[in-house]
Image (cartoon, rainbow, N blue to C red):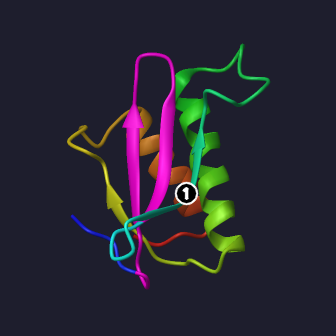
């Protein structure tokens, strides 16, 4: 899966503690911006899926601010459920299309 300038790639990585999302332009081989739950505050009393949804909303807001409306969703081999699905739903709620 590759991303272009018109439709960059939204790549997801999840660990046991955190979830990370970054938007990548593969033609220029450059990460445009990234967001993670590792540097978010006020997440102590939330579930992991709620945190992933917040990261999705944040990455979607960053993308819309930069003028990116469509992305290619790269789930990096993770199954599309749980935290990965919550992140995708959060990004869609912010206005991203994929």
Residue 77, placed above or below residue 91: above
Between 34 and 61, the one lying in front of the other is 34
Residue lying at the far bottom in this picture: please name it.
6
- In percent of width and height, residue 32 lies at 54, 64
Specify whether residue 21 is in view: yes
Indicate left or right for 63 with 25 as reference.
Answer: right
Q: Which residues are magenta?
A: 5-24
- In percent of width and height, residue 45 lies at 71, 14
Between 24 and 40, the one lying in front of the other is 24
Q: Which residue is mark 1?
A: 91
- In percent of width and height, residue 68 lies at 56, 77
The stretch drawn in magenta includes residue 6: yes
Label 1 CA crowd tier, 10 Å (few <14, some 14–19, many 20+)? many
Indicate left or right for 14 with 76 as reference.
Answer: right
Residue 68, placed above or below residue 47: below
- In percent of width and height, residue 57 lies at 64, 52
Q: On the rendered image, what quadrant is the C terminus found in?
A: bottom left
Residue 89, placed above or below residue 4: above
Indicate left or right for 6 with 32 as reference.
Answer: left
Secondary structure of residue under mark 1: helix
């Amino acid at each position: 899966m590759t991303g272009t300038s018109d439709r960059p790639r939204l790549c997801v990585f999840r660990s046991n503690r955190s979830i990370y999302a970054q938007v990548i332009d593969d033609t220029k081989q450059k990460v445009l911006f990234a967001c993670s739950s590792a540097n978010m505050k006020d997440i102590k009393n939330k579930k992991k899926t709620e945190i992933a949804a917040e990261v999705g909303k944040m990455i979607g807001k960053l993308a819309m601010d930069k003028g990116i409306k469509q992305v290619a969703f790269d789930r990096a081999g993770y199954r599309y459920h749980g935290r990965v699905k919550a992140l995708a739903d959060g990004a869609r709620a912010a206005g991203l299309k994929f």
